[in-house]
Amino acid sequence: MSETEKTAEKGKAPVECAKCGQANAAGTNHCVQCGSRLYISCHNCGHSTVRSASRCGYCGHRLHRSMWSRVRRRVFGRNPKITPFQIVLLIAFVLIAYKVITYIVEYRPPSYVGE
């Protein structure tokens, strides 16, 4: 963390918005120009840190989650373990999809003779 971020965290220097780059007065919680939050709470210790910082100034923990971890959390929720029910459901889906695809590929429309 740079000296500017450390002093901005203490409320002595202007805080730069991470979204639009606007310099905001010390002690404000939201950007004057775009309205976004200027501080973020650490997921590890709960300490409030300038949003533009990549790591917490108190414990050093990463502040922003990676794209993969956000997608994984949305898909699997808080508990990413796969249950036996999910495995059975996946196998059933694959078998049904296989049967439908083979039926479509092998389907021959009936031919009408003589009319």
Image (cartoon, helix red, strand yellow):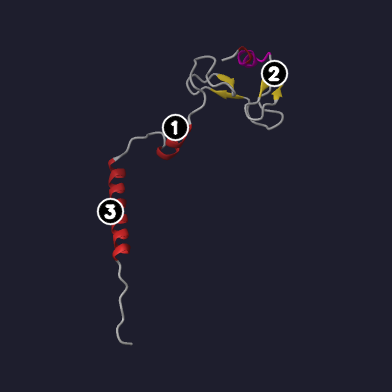
Please state the horizontal and vertical placement of residue 72, each as a whole percent of the image.
42, 36
Q: How many marks?
A: 3
**Residue 25, placed above or below residue 36:** above
Magenta residues (range) = 5-12
Q: Is residue 7 magenta?
A: yes
> Is mark 2 in CB contact (under 8 Å) with mark 1?
no
What kind of residue is marked 2? Pro
Tell me the residue at 54%/22% (across/down): 54
**Residue 32, placed above or below residue 48:** below
Q: Is residue 21 magenta?
A: no
In the figure, is residue 44 to the left or right of 12? left
What kind of residue is marked 1? Ser
Label 1 – label 3 distance at C-alpha: 30 Å
Please state the horizontal and vertical placement of residue 66, each as a whole percent of the image.
48, 30
Tell me the residue at 30%/39% (across/down): 83
**Residue 46, placed above or below residue 78:** above
> Is mark 2 in CB contact (under 8 Å) with mark 3?
no
Q: Which residue is mark 1?
A: 69
Please state the horizontal and vertical placement of residue 51, each as a whole percent of the image.
59, 24
Label 2 – label 1 distance at C-alpha: 32 Å
Predominant secondary structure, magenta span: helix
Q: Which of the two discs, 1 and 3, labels the residue nearer the N terminus?
A: 1
Q: Secondary structure at mark 3?
A: helix
Label 2 – label 3 distance at C-alpha: 61 Å
Q: Secondary structure at mark 2?
A: loop
What kind of residue is marked 3? Leu
Residue 95 numbered tag? 3
**Residue 68, placed above or below residue 4:** below
In the figure, is residue 10 to the left or right of 99? right
Q: Secondary structure at mark 1?
A: helix
Label 3 crowding class (10 Å Cα cut-off): few <14, some 14-19, many 20+? few
Label 1 crowding class (10 Å Cα cut-off): few <14, some 14-19, many 20+? few
